[in-house]
Image (cartoon, rainbow, N blue to C red):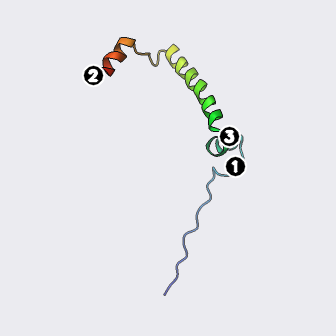
Amino acid sequence: MSTTTPPQSQPDPLVGTGTRIDAALHWLYLHGDRRIVSGLMLPATFVVSLLLIRSSLITPAEADEVVAISSR
């Protein structure tokens, strides 16, 4: 019987670099308080939406169009 050794895993170059972005993502995904994370995401989403509307990349729907779509 021959025993084969499992292949050695390669280190991930993006893990453990110790940058501020890594620390922020680690906090965001693992340790961050969900109320703080959602409190940061809500105004960010509003500002991005506002900028997209101002630059005419998206347009808000008229109220009668929303009612017409939802009534079907």
Q: Which mark is residue 72?
A: 2
Please name the amino acid that badge 2 sits on.
Answer: Arg
Q: Is residue 2 above or below residue 48?
A: below
Residue denoted by label 3 = 24
* Residue 50: image location, x then y, percent: 54, 17
- Front residue (pair 50, 42): 42
Instruction: Mark 3 and mark 1 in contact? Answer it, CB < 8 Å.
Output: no
Quarter of the image holding residue 39?
top right
Residue drawn 50% across the image and 85% down it: 2
- Pinpoint residue 70: horizontal percent, then vertical percent: 33, 21
**Above or below — where is 22 with respect to 53?**
below
Q: Amino acid at mark 3?
A: Ala
Tell me which residue sits at (47%, 15%) in the image: 56
Residue 58, label in figure = none
x and y, in percent, of residue 66 in the image:
36, 17
Is the C-beta separation of discs 2 and 1 under 8 Å? Answer: no
Numbered disc 3: secondary structure? helix
As helix, strand or loop, the secondary structure at mark 2 comes to loop
Callout 2 crowding tier (Cα within 10 Å): few <14, some 14–19, many ≥20: few
* Three-letter amino acid code of the residue under disc 1: Thr
Residue displayed at 34% across by 14% down: 65
3 or 1: mark nearer the eye: 3
Q: Which mark is residue 17?
A: 1
Say whether disc 3 or disc 1 marks the residue closer to the N-terminus. Answer: 1
Quadrant that contains the C terminus: top left
